[in-house]
Image (cartoon, rainbow, N blue to C red):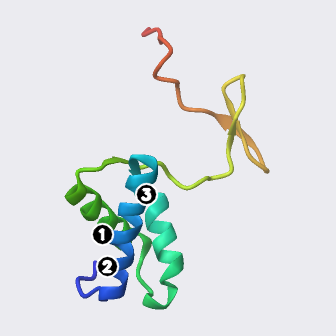
């Protein structure tokens, strides 16, 4: 993890978090960090490092946060299978549905 981030990158993180919080009321750490990373490709900073900066900025604002991943292209089917372009696999259990313990 780097500690010498540019003032421009830090300003972009802070403004992105504030803007997201004002419009959505919740800050998606992964999505916001990816937006900042793409706008600052010349900085060559890892997504994980920018996520950490976004998390810090969101915590300073007292914003609600979420950690949803970027879209992975998988589709959950009604029969519990996950389908992508190559194969189907079993989806993780839905925690909202009761499961029997045997």
Q: For the point 47% across and 76% down, which residue is it?
A: 37
Which quadrant of the rendered structure holds the C terminus?
top left
Query: Visible in this render: residue 100?
Result: yes
Query: Which residue matches tag 2?
Result: 10
Q: Are marks 3 and 1 in contact (CB under 8 Å)?
A: no
Q: Residues within 10 Å of mark 3 (few under 14, many from 20)?
A: some
* 83 relative to 59 in the view: left or right: right
Query: Which residue matches tag 1?
Result: 53
Q: Quadrant of residue 74?
A: top right
Query: Which residue matches tag 3?
Result: 20
Instruction: Of the two numbered discs 3 and 1 on the same chain, state the one appearing first in sequence.
Output: 3
Instruction: Of the two numbered discs 3 and 2 on the same chain, state the one appearing first in sequence.
Output: 2
Q: Of helix, strand and loop, which one carries label 2?
A: helix
The x and y percentages for residue 19 are: 41, 62
Number of marks in the rendered image: 3
> Where is 90 relative to 59, above or below?
above
Alpha carbons under labels 1 and 2: distance apart: 8 Å
Q: For the point 46% across and 22% down, which residue is it?
A: 95
Instruction: Of the two numbered discs 1 and 2 on the same chain, state the one appearing first in sequence.
Output: 2
* 70 relative to 28 in the view: left or right: right
> Where is 65 relative to 4, above or below?
above
The x and y percentages for residue 6 are: 31, 89
């Amino acid at each position: 993890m780097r500690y010498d981030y540019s003032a421009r990158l830090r300003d972009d993180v802070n403004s992105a978090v504030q803007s997201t919080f004002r419009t959505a009321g919740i800050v998606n750490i992964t999505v916001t960090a990816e937006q900042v990373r793409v706008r600052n490709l010349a900085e060559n900073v890892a997504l994980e490092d920018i996520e950490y900066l976004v998390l810090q900025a969101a915590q300073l604002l007292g914003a609600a946060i979420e950690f949803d991943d970027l879209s992975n292209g998988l589709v959950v089917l009604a029969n519990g299978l996950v389908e992508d372009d190559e194969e189907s696999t079993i989806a993780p259990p839905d925690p909202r549905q009761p499961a029997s313990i045997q």
